Image: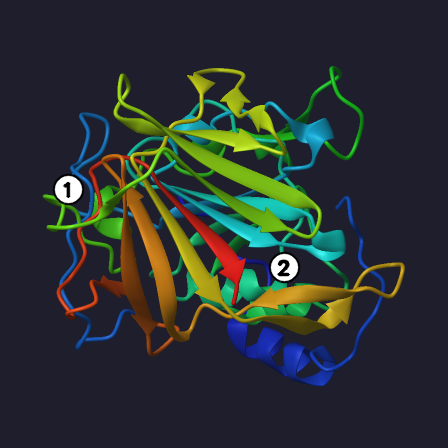
Amino acid sequence: MVRRRRITRAAALLVAAATVSVTASCTSGTGRDDGRAPVSPPPATSQSPRTATGPVLAVKIDNVPQARPQTGLDAADIVYVEQVEGGLSRLMALYATRLPAEVGPVRSARESDLELLRQFDEPMLAFSGAQGKLLPVIDAAPVHPESPDTAADAYTRSADRASPHNLYLHPGKLLSAPPGADALTTGFRYGPAPSGGTPVNSTTVRYPAAEYTFTWSSQRHRWLVAMDGREAVTTDAGAVAPATVVVQHVTVRPSAFHDSNGNHTPYTETVGSGTAQVLRDGKAYDAEWSRPDASGGTRFTTDDGRPLNFAEGQVWVVFAEK
C-alpha cells in the first residue's frame, strides 16, 4: 500500500519554479542510473525479501534533548545526521528491512533532504511539515511525501511529551510490509574489513550546538552512541549501537530558506566528493567519497581506490562540515 500524492508532479513543478527563490518563516513544528556501480545491501531479514517490493521509508526524527529518547531508531538500516538551524542536528532514518511499530518524534523536512533522497526510487518521506515555501518543492520532488496533512491516520500525539516533540509515526499505516534490502540503493558495500586501519576507542563529531561520540564496544562489537555527552538509548530497544559509522566531510552552506528568526537553513551538499572516516570493527579507515550525480548512491573507497566495505548491520552517516 503506497499513498498517492495529492497533486500531479507537473503542476507541482510549476508551483515550485515560481516559489523556490522566495524565502519565508519556518513552521518549526509542523531512477536509478543504468551505469550505477553494483551495490551490496545488508542481508534481508525474515520480515523482508531480498527483492525490493516498494519504496524505502525515510523518517525525519527530532533530536533536541526534549525529543530523547527516541523510538524505533534501532530498526533503521541507515541513520543520517544533518545540521539544522542554530547549529542543532536532526536525524533521517531509512527503513527497508524492518518496520517498527512506532517511530519518532517526527519533525519537519529540509531542502537538502530531497537531494539526499534522490538516490532512491521514489522513496516515501514521513515528516511533520516544512517551511511554507518549501512544501511545493517537496511535492515536485520524486518522493512520496507523507505528513499528518496527507496521512493523519498514520500519526499520533503522545501525552507524555510537550509539542512539538510528541508526534509519532506508525509505519504500518503507510506500508503493508518492508520493501526489502534492494530498496537501499545507497552505493554502500558490505563485507570483510579492508587491511590496515587505525585502532580507535572513540570518535567525536561536533556541530555548533550538538555533539556525537561513538565509542567502540568490544563486547557488543558495535559503536555505542552518545549525544551531547549522554548515552543514546531508545524507548523500545535500549542503547543505540550501529555496526558502521561514517563521518562524511561535506560542504554546508545557507539554503534559500530561513526560520522565523531570519536564520538561513543549512543546506548539506551530498553530491560531489571529499574525504571521510569509516569506523568499523574498532578501527578507523581514511576514505574518499564520491557521488557524481544526485540520482546515484555514494561510493566510498580507500586511499588506493579500492571499495571500502561496511560491516553488516546498521550504518550511521554523520555529515560533518569540511
Q: Which mark is residue 50?
A: 1
Q: Residues within 10 Å of mark 1 (few under 14, many from 20)?
A: some
Q: Nearer the viewer, mark 2 or mark 1?
A: 2
The numbered mark, 2 or 1, whose residue comes first in the sequence reads 1
Say what amino acid the circle numbered 1 marks: Arg
Q: Quadrant of the N terminus?
A: top left
Q: Position of residue 300 (x, y in %)?
A: 26, 62
Which residue in the protein does label 2 denote? Answer: 110
Q: Compared with residue 14, is residue 38 higher up or lower down, i.e. above or below?
A: above
Judged left or right of residue 94, residue 88 is right
Q: Position of residue 30 (x, y in %)?
A: 75, 46
Q: Position of residue 282 (x, y in %)?
A: 27, 35
CA–CA distance in space, label 2 to label 1: 30 Å
Say what amino acid the circle numbered 2 marks: Arg
Q: What kind of element bears circle 1?
A: loop
- Residue 166 visible in the displayed image: no
Q: Position of residue 306 (x, y in %)?
A: 13, 65
